[in-house]
Amino acid sequence: MGSISHNQVTVSICFKIILYVLVFIISHVDGQNASQQLSITFIADAITKGAVCLDGTPGAYYFSKGFGDGINSWMIFLPGGAWCATNEGCLNKSSTDLGSNKNPPPLPLGTFQSTNKTINPDFYNWNIVQIRYCDGASFMADVEAVNPETNLHLRGRRIFTSVIEELKSTQGMSNAENALLIGNSAGGLATILNCDRFHSFLPGACRVKCISDSGFFIRAEHLRGAQDNAIDNFRKVVLFHISKYVAPNSPNEVGWNNCTTEFSKLSSCTENQHHIIMGNPNS
């Protein structure tokens, strides 16, 4: 076995030095970000508006005010947190931070939310908003009725709408020039589903973009049976949260069972049903 050459020793030492430097930099950045935390802001008159979590507590968001040339630029982040599709599942979720705002923790800012220009050169002076995800349906349900037995509130759509309207009326978002809606996982799906609505809230903005991180769940088998389970789970979420919102608006609006339960037969939906499902009811 040959001896280790001088060059090999030098390379090994240099590699260790580089590794230590990287660890130090990452630790330093994490430490700076950890010191930046946002407190919660509850939606004004949330109960009256019905903009509430699964357990009926007020919807809320975190907000960091923009400054300088970023004063009219906005980043809205929708976090992940899975879904619930049954009374039992949503009741369980309603006793956690993903279904209640009883004790919302402060929000440590991520790298792309940091106000440090060195860490976050592109967005450091933007208005940063993170909406609390506590409805279990990607901010899509809007059910007026509350089951007295479970006291579950299915109102995520109202939370999203109320936050945007509040930011426009109180924080200057109505003057937005640039706006990003970003989400991951369940929040990524929410970004896809709410992108057009988000754009409609800001008709005067020069640029409105949506970025979905891991929010598009393709129909591709990866593990035996997993895809069937995924489709069935999403079907249950829609049936539990959304189909109640898209209940018939008139006796003539028939065929909701096929429209909302058989995704392979969407052609059975009427034009008005398609508008309602997409969040643009015309009646």
Image (cartoon, helix red, strand yellow):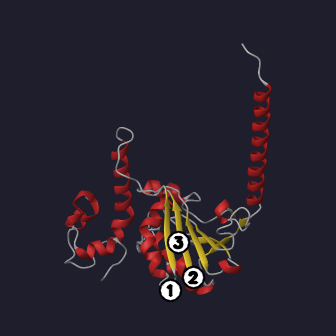
Residue 115 placement (x, y as % from top left): 72, 68
Circle 3 packing at 10 Å, graded few (<14), some (14-19), many (20+), is many
Give the residue at the far top of this rendering.
1
Q: Which element type, helix, strand or loop, lies under badge 3?
A: loop
**Quick one: 197 or 59, which is closer to the camera?**
197
**Residue 66, disc:** none
**Quick one: 63 or 71, which is closer to the camera?**
71
**Quick one: 116 or 239, which is closer to the camera?**
116
User: Which residue is labeled 1 in the image?
Assistant: 204
Q: What residue sits 51% from the left and 77% below the top? A: 207
**Residue 52, disc:** 3
The disc, 2 or 3, on the residue closer to the chain's N-terminal end is 3
The disc, 2 or 1, on the residue closer to the chain's N-terminal end is 2
At label 1, the amino acid type is Gly
Residue 214 placement (x, y as % from top left): 48, 55
What is the distance, in whole Å, between disc 2 and disc 3 at their CAs? 26 Å
At label 3, the amino acid type is Val
Residue 35 placement (x, y as % from top left): 77, 61
User: Which residue is labeled 2 in the image?
Assistant: 176
Asked if 194 appears above or below 167 in the picture, the reply is above
Residue 118 appears left or right of 204:
right
Residue 138 visible in the current orientation: no
Numbered disc in front, either 2 or 3: 2
Asked if disc 2 and disc 1 are in contact, CB closer than 8 Å, the reply is yes
The disc, 3 or 1, on the residue closer to the chain's N-terminal end is 3
